[in-house]
Amino acid sequence: MAFVAVDPPRDEALEAAGMRRSETRSLGEVELLLLLERAMRRERAAALAASWRGDGFSLYEGGGRVAARWTVSLASAADAAEVCARLAVTVERLRREGCPSVVGGTATGCPVELRAEGERLVLRRGS
């Protein structure tokens, strides 16, 4: 396994709106595994999580609200596409859950976006 350095993602729109990037770090393979286990059997989740090569996470705060950005590098574009497809139901459930403390969120809905960009997975929570 070759580790890939992934810079914590920046969101210029959030920064322009006065939010500050309060935390940056790597969440690691285990965090990816925990997310995948919400959507599939442990064995398949573990196999996909093992394709993790690196990640960067940013937490934004401001005005009593938060937003998160997470970019994950995987072993292949096929792995990124599969993770994205497998997490579609989980992402839909997150959208329906209330998250009033998340930027753009309400008591009945939450802005969440997940997409594959080549070998990378991009997760945005909060608009």
Image (cartoon, rainbow, N blue to C red):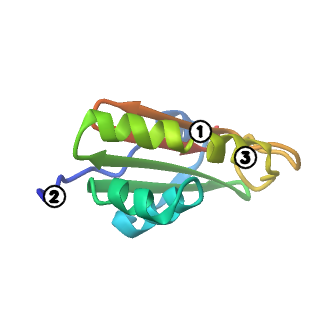
Q: Which residue matches tag 2?
A: 3
Q: Which residue matches tag 1?
A: 88
Q: Disc 1 residue type?
A: Ala
Q: Disc 2 residue type?
A: Phe
The numbered mark at residue 125 is: none
Q: Name the spot of residue 77 as percent of width and height, x first.
A: 28, 33
Residue 11 seen in render? no
Q: Name the spot of residue 73 as percent of width and height, x first.
A: 28, 47
Task: Tell me which residue sits at (44%, 50%) in the image.
Answer: 70
Q: CA distance from mark 3 to mark 1?
A: 9 Å
Residue 34 seen in render? yes
Task: Tell me which residue sits at (58%, 53%) in the image.
Answer: 39
Of the two numbered discs 3 and 2 in the rendering, the one whose residue sits closer to the viewer: 3
Mark 2, other Cα within 10 Å: few <14 / some 14–19 / many ≥20: few
Q: Which residue matches tag 3?
A: 93
Q: Disc 3 residue type?
A: Arg
Side (left or right) of 36 relative to 49? right
| 59 vs 111: above or below | below
Q: Earlier in the sequence, mark 3 or mark 1?
A: 1
Q: Earlier in the sequence, mark 3 or mark 2?
A: 2
Q: Nearer the viewer, residue 91 or 58?
A: 91
Secondary element at tag 2: loop
Side (left or right) of 43 relative to 68? left
Q: CA distance from mark 1 to mark 2?
A: 26 Å
